[in-house]
Amino acid sequence: MNAKTLFFCLIYLLTLPASLQASTIERIYEVTLPVVNQQRDSRNAAFEQALIEVAVRISGTSLAPTQLN
């Protein structure tokens, strides 16, 4: 390996972590869902649906609702 290739590999490896930083997602845990009425069953169904949506957001997979055991 010559010096030029080694130099460019080193520069690439030093700049790579700067481009791979994680991004911040605002309000990932917040969900707003309409409810038909204020009865307990309707509110519980909306809460369950919101929990599923948050699980999908956090996990990044649509299979999350089936894995909530």
Image: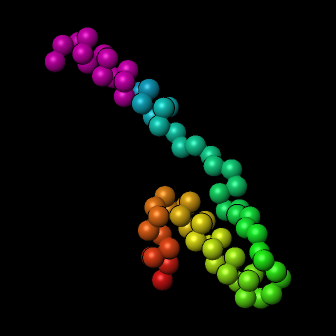
In the image: residue 20, left or right of residue 46: left
- The question of residue 65 being in magenta is answered with no
Asked if residue 6 is positioned above or below residue 56 in the image, the reply reads above
Q: Identify which residue, 15 or 43, lies in the foreground.
A: 43
For the record, the magenta segment spans: 1-13
Q: Position of residue 43 (x, y in %)?
A: 75, 81
In the image: residue 17, left or right of residue 10: right
Asked if residue 25 is positioned above or below residue 63 in the image, the reply reads above
- Residue 23 sits in quarter: top right
Q: Identify which residue, 16 or 60, lies in the foreground.
A: 60
In the image: residue 31, left or right of residue 37: left
Asked if residue 12 is positioned above or below residue 51 in the image, the reply reads above
Determine the residue positioned at 47% across, 64% down. Answer: 62
- The question of residue 11 being in magenta is answered with yes
Q: Position of residue 68 (x, y in %)?
A: 50, 78
Q: Position of residue 40 (x, y in %)?
A: 77, 88
Q: Identify which residue, 63 or 9, lies in the foreground.
A: 63
- Residue 4 sits in quarter: top left
Count of marks overlaid on the render? 0
Which is the main secondary structure of the residues drawn in magenta?
A: helix
Q: Quadrant of the N terminus?
A: top left
Determine the residue positioned at 44% across, 26% down. Answer: 15
